[in-house]
Image (cartoon, helix red, strand yellow):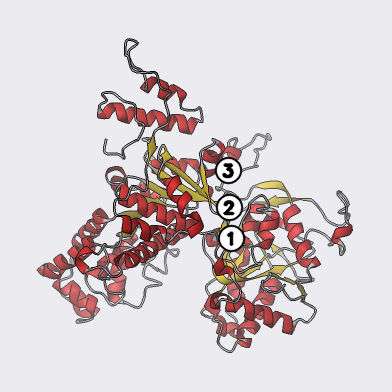
Amino acid sequence: MDAPKLENYPTGKHTAADELEFRMSLQRALVLGSGFWTVLRTSKHRPGSSPAPVTLPCVPEVNLLDIEDAALMDALMMEILPADRARFRQYFSKRALGLGLMTAGPGFGKTTALSVAALGMVETLGPIFASAPTHVAVNTFAARLYAVSSSVVERSNKGKPEKSCIRRQLVVRGYDEEEYEAFQRLLRDPKGVDDATSDSWKRPGRWNLHLSKAHWLLMCIRSRAVPSLHPCDSIAIHRLQRQVDQDNRLVRLRRVASGAISWEEYANGKMVDKNVIEALFRRILEAADIVCATPAQSCGKFYRDWKKTKARGFAIDEAANMTRPDLYSLWGNTMMPCILAGDERQLPPAAMTLNETDADGNAINRLGRDAKISPLEFLKGLGMPVYRLKTQLRMANGLFDLSKRFIYADVNCTYGPGCSIELDAHRIGRDLESFACVKYPQLNAAPTGSLQPLFLHCAHSYCHVDPITKSKSNRDQATVALDFILDFISSTAGRVRPSQVAIITPYTANMHIIEEVRRDMKYTTLASMKPAKTIHSFQGQESDIVVAIMATTKQSGPGMTTDEHHLNVMLSRHRSGLIIVGDIHVTGRLDSNMKARGKGQNKFGQDKFQVRGANGEMSWLNATVLRSVHQTLWDNKRVIMV
């Protein structure tokens, strides 16, 4: 078996079949959570007459950062905070079973740190399969892997002669059948990147150009739809470009891509056969150093063989949102090196019909609670060592305080140097604070040196509940939010662009209402602002300013916003400003004197609510965190009455 070497591997003569069986036994023991004593004791057997001293068996280890080039290693470690570099190298240089776990709250740099570890695995082990539970998360992970690889290469090559320069890793974002269709559409219209797979008869696809096979092939044929190949891009992709340049069958393809002939001329003549294009796609895939795809795609015909024959390790982002079966279908059963990163306090794996029962009262999904346990949470529960990140890197000072106080109270974390509100990166946050304080004088200014969230209280707004899906929507809150965004952007004299603002909401119905309201001519200025998204579709993404529209009212109840995981995502997607739009009294009247309340004296509020989850399941949830967030904003006078 072609797999990474295990340190502390049992001594003696072993065949490849013996090692494979040993690895499979280790994986079974890990998944069962039964410990490794039985497996290790069996593998450590030796004749009783042997004079060698008896030694206790130990779990095999794998060095995931065994990089011989010291300069490259130093360049890679520059992506890690100086205070964390020593323990990062120590942790990933000696991983039991080749298994690494990484966890932290939002904005702590998990994806970047995971990318560094994954690039170290590529240098040490060979090609890596990178994955995440959703297409959006995979896109984000792939883009970060390529960005970190580019940064490391640029840093390592500085001052070196061209012959001794290293190259970027070839990162390929994997897709299925839509790749060829998108390639053809971009040949026809190089400017139509955003709708390359759109079809009026189909739902919008998941395809994204960046780092896809179509992206790399368009680069090779010098298409106007993509940038030119960088001199430091992979040698394999430069070699493919030279071969494409010399292939007479591809002359017309190169000419239409470069604009030398029109699409009509190309279509009316001899076009390159689809099989030739797909063969080029396969060559790009075979040359990849890192392939990024979802667990379902990893089991499909396009990537299953690459995973089985080429992948020497796995890197999983957003592992707290992935189901254990998804991980096992991707990872396999031969104890290959694997690193998982995520935050179990954000969205858990989706479990359908979690609390639903049949007509006789029997649970429809009797294993629903078990399905909510992610692989990251499961492996942490087994006692596997965890690498924890402790520095907030994204949010401006003060903007993580609500999450820190009510969700990550047990985490000892600090703000990093990039969180100072005086930096240009957070100027938009200062503009938002100034605008709000001028327009609403009753608002308390944020403490010096920090920024604080705002709450727009929409009194008497109406929450519509869909009679079939039970999804909630609130046109009044959507209008208030869009008016506020419009006024804010207009007040900045062009310093703030609509694209720097994102709208998120817990409910799909409300997302559609927001987009419907946005179509009003009044909001033409906001055309460049990205479409509103639900919490699930926005997890793992971020924006300078985030507007969270709750949609709920006191009459409708708080709904799924009582769930701490959903609330955590809503409170943590911003960099420089957070605006919450909703009903501040959704959990009941707030006490104006928080300090005067004693334990059990919350006479105005309600502790528990019956909630229908994102998958239709009904449950009773505690609203303690939601109410505490509202109470804090109320006490700090950060609530604007609309």
Residue 468 seen anywhere in this rendered image of the structure: no
Looking at the image, the residue that sits furthest to the top is 49
Q: Position of residue 410 (x, y in %)?
A: 66, 49
Q: In the rendered view of the protein, which quadrant contains the N terminus?
A: top left
Tell me which corner region of the image, top left, top right, bottom left or bottom right, holds residue 534.
bottom right
Mark 2 residue element = loop
- Note whether 263 is above or below 305 in the view shown: below
Tell me which corner region of the image, top left, top right, bottom left or bottom right, holds residue 364.
top right
Camera-side residue of 84 and 97:
84
Q: Earlier in the sequence, mark 2 or mark 1?
A: 2
Tell me which corner region of the image, top left, top right, bottom left or bottom right, holds residue 41.
top left
Mark 3 residue element = loop
* Residue type, mark 2 in image: Leu
Which of the labelled discs sits on residue 372, or is there none? Answer: 3
Residue 300 seen anywhere in this rendered image of the structure: yes
* Residue type, mark 1 in image: Ile
* Residue type, mark 3 in image: Lys
Mark 1 residue element = helix
Residue at the location (70% across, 74% down)? 448
Q: Position of residue 594 (x, y in %)?
A: 85, 60
Name the side, left or right, on which 107 lies relative to 48. right
Residue at the location (51% across, 41% down)? 385
Residue at the location (54% across, 53% down)? 389
Report how far apart the C-alphas of labels 2 and 1 lie in the structure.
9 Å
Residue under pointer 2: 347
Residue at the location (36% across, 54% down)? 119
Q: In the rendered view of the protein, which quadrant contains the C terminus?
A: bottom right
Residue under pointer 1: 535
